[in-house]
């Protein structure tokens, strides 16, 4: 519009376009910000999902043996120590000159008296005897009550054949025992015969019983897989887990069975709290993103509404974003 000069002042020309031109701002467009917000929300959702799956895997996976192997190893160590101690004792007896003389002379009466003395020296032994090169058994009368399997094992040992060691014999429940054997050698290391000591199985059960707890079941098996002795009880209507361990210097196996550890309540509560927190975080992020863009759009429309209300009706409105 044109205003005539007054008092000699120069003419002033004002352009509506120059007065109301909206300066271009170097900001991201609404479309770009929307895409970036969506990518952010998707990345957040995938991260939370990965963490949630990892927590669920840790919670539902098997809880391990709950130190089952350590308890089993401690119990097996007791049996190994006892067997090692007994082997040392009978080895000491086999090296005595009296033992060598009994086998060389095959004196039955002297061997019986000797066996009774050795039993007092070995209070845990249920039988002590010698087996000479001819297959004769020298010792206390109980040695004459050995079952056929026991005699068969002793015969195999006397011939140098391998048997499942220590051999276990349970034909007669009252005489159930295992045998510890060692060769008897002379001064020239020639084999004179075999010394064997019978140990009652109740001694092994006492080892399994010591320091055991409710809910545990220890099972000791021989080299044939037969149960030697057992202690403890585990309910049949619960989930159990077990582990086995070989007894060193023997063909025996010790097995421990316990109730499987259940999922803990703190782990479940942590999983629930994380899921609720993740849900609230995603919903809050979406709500914040939508609210921010809504306010921005409302501000733009409000600004254009203010400009439109103050714009002269006879002047065309400019383009807020002129082409470059």
Image (cartoon, rainbow, N blue to C red):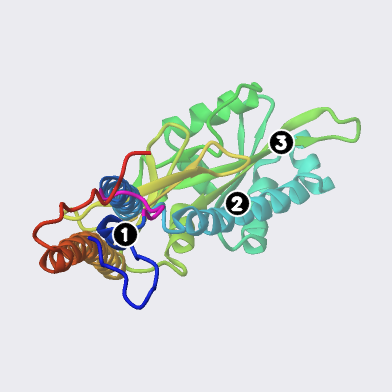
Tell me, yes or no, if residue 192 can be seen here.
Answer: yes
- Main SS of the magenta segment? loop
Residue 322 marker: none
Q: Which residues are magenta?
A: 24-30
Name the residue: 85% across, 34% down.
186
Between disc 2 and disc 3, the foreground one is: 2
Q: Which residue of the protein is positioned furthest toward the right in this rendering?
A: 188
Element assignment for label 3: loop
- The number of numbered badges drawn on the structure is 3
Question: Nearest the camera: 320 or 151?
Answer: 320
Circle 2 Cα neighbour tier, 10 Å, few/some/many (<14 / 14–19 / ≥20)? some
Reading the image, the residue beneath label 1 is 261
Quadrant for the C terminus, please: top left
Task: Tell me whether circle 1 and circle 3 mark residues in contact (CB < 8 Å).
Answer: no
Reading the image, the residue beneath label 2 is 80
Q: Is residue 29 magenta?
A: yes
Image-quadrant location for residue 89:
bottom right
Reading the image, the residue beneath label 3 is 106
Q: CA distance from mark 2 to mark 3?
A: 34 Å
Image-quadrant location for residue 304:
bottom left
Between disc 2 and disc 1, the foreground one is: 1
N-terminal-most mark, 1 or 3: 3
Q: Which residue of the protein is positioned furthest toward the bottom in this rendering?
A: 7
Q: CA distance from mark 2 to mark 1?
A: 28 Å
Image: 29 above or below 148: below
Name the residue: 55% across, 28% down.
163
N-terminal-most mark, 2 or 1: 2
């Amino acid at each position: 519009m044109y205003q005539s000069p007054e008092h000699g002042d120069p003419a002033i020309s004002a352009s509506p376009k120059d007065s109301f031109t909206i300066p271009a701002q170097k900001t991201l467009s609404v479309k770009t910000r929307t895409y970036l917000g969506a990518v952010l929300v998707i990345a957040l959702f995938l991260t939370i999902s990965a963490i949630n799956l990892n927590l669920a895997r840790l919670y539902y996976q098997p809880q391990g043996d709950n130190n089952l192997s350590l308890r089993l190893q401690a119990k097996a160590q007791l049996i190994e120590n006892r067997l090692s101690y007994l082997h040392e004792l009978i080895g000491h007896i086999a090296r005595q000159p009296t033992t060598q003389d009994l086998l060389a002379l095959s004196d039955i009466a002297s061997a019986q008296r000797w066996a009774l003395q050795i039993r007092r020296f070995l209070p845990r032994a249920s039988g002590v005897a010698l087996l000479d090169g001819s297959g004769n058994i020298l010792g206390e009368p109980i040695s004459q009550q050995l079952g056929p399997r026991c005699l068969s094992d002793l015969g195999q040992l006397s011939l140098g054949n391998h048997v499942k060691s220590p051999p276990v014999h349970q034909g007669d429940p009252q005489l159930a025992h295992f045998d510890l054997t060692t060769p008897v050698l002379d001064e020239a290391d020639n084999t004179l015969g075999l010394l064997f000591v019978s140990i009652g199985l109740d001694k092994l059960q006492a080892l399994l019983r010591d320091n055991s707890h409710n809910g545990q079941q220890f099972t000791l098996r021989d080299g044939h897989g037969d149960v030697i002795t057992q202690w403890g009880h585990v309910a049949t209507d619960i989930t159990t887990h077990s582990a086995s361990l070989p007894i060193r210097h023997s063909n025996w196996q010790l097995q421990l069975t316990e109730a499987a550890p259940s999922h803990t309540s703190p782990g479940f509560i942590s999983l629930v709290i994380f899921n609720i927190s993740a849900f609230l975080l995603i919903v809050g992020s979406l709500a914040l993103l939508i609210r921010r863009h809504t306010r921005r759009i409302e501000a733009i429309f409000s600004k254009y509404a203010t400009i439109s209300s103050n714009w002269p009706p006879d002047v065309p409105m400019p383009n807020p974003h002129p082409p470059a």
